[in-house]
């Protein structure tokens, strides 16, 4: 949940975004609502109102019973309340041009473009982002760093090439190559202190984790 990550001390929150059946921008990782709500069905076949009626909090903790799934507008409102909080926004396929244009316009209209980095593993989708919002910072997601991935980063003119953390640990030269290309690298998804230490020693620009509270405490202890 974005608000919990922000409260845990994260400098940047990472969310996944999918379009609902009526073209609204919903914060959800899965293509189905089943795992993270009391509802059932495909995100792309349900309206935003139908999905928001589902209890999406009980599976996490009874304290959050009745909490609806957040929409992009809810995350942007959170950012407005927390000036130091940035957003790493991953677009999950598929997106039509009109729903994507609407989602990107929400970011622009809120005046938050400089605090948002949009990323995807799809070259086609990121090309659409570049066409619709050329001033918005872009990132490319990849679990490999071969010639194809390097070419995609260059073509998309990304500011960040974000890779699986194990790739960097096993092949430290990848991080050096990404930095040499003038791009940042935020590693995903590292959840253990040993992994964080290895990534920090390598010099990554950010760590994507499911445990922002633990990472914040670990970083504080490391700094001290």
Image (tube, helix red, strand yellow):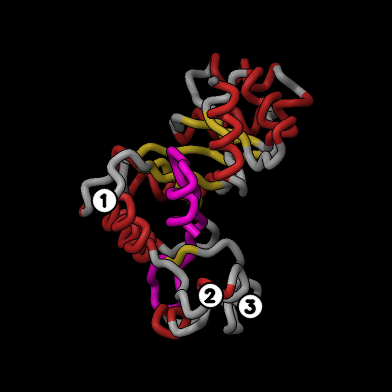
Label ID, residue 56? 2
Q: Position of residue 66 (x, y in %)?
A: 48, 80
User: Could you tell me which residue is drawn at 46 percent across and 35 percent down?
Assistant: 156
Q: Name the residue under label 3.
A: 34
Left-right relation of 143 to 45:
right
| N-term mark: 1 or 2 | 2
- Quote the CA–CA distance across marks 3 and 2: 10 Å
- Evaluate if marks 3 and 2 touch, with contact meaning CB atoms under 8 Å apart: no
Look at the numbered disc 2 and give the secondary structure of its residue: loop
Viewer-proximal residue among 55 and 26: 55
**Quarter of the image where the C terminus is located:** top right
Look at the numbered disc 1 and give the secondary structure of its residue: helix
Left-right relation of 151 to 167:
left
Stretch of the chain drawn in magenta = 1-25
- Quote the CA–CA distance across marks 1 and 2: 23 Å
Q: Position of residue 187 (x, y in %)?
A: 61, 34
- Closer to us: mark 1 or mark 3? 1
Q: Name the residue under label 1.
A: 80
Queried whether the magenta region covers residue 104, the answer comes back as no
């Amino acid at each position: 949940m974005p608000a919990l990550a922000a409260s845990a001390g994260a400098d940047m929150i990472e969310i996944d975004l999918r379009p609902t059946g009526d073209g609204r921008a919903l914060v959800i990782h899965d293509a189905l609502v089943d795992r993270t709500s009391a509802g059932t069905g495909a995100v792309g076949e349900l309206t935003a109102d139908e999905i928001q009626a589902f209890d999406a909090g009980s599976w996490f903790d009874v304290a959050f019973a009745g909490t609806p799934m957040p929409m992009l507008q809810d995350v942007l409102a959170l950012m407005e309340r927390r000036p130091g909080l940035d957003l790493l926004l991953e677009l999950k396929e598929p997106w039509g041009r009109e729903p994507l244009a609407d989602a990107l316009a929400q970011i622009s209209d809120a005046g938050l473009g400089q605090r948002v980095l949009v990323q995807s593993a799809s070259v086609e989708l990121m090309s659409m982002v570049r066409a619709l919002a050329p001033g918005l910072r872009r990132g490319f997601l990849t679990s490999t760093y071969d010639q194809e991935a390097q070419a995609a980063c260059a073509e998309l003119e990304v500011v960040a090439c974000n890779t699986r953390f194990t790739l960097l640990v096993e092949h430290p030269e990848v991080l050096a190559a990404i930095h040499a290309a003038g791009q940042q690298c935020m590693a995903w998804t590292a959840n253990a202190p040993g992994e964080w230490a290895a990534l920090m020693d390598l010099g990554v620009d950010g760590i994507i984790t499911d445990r922002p509270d633990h990472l914040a405490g670990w970083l504080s202890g490391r700094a001290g």
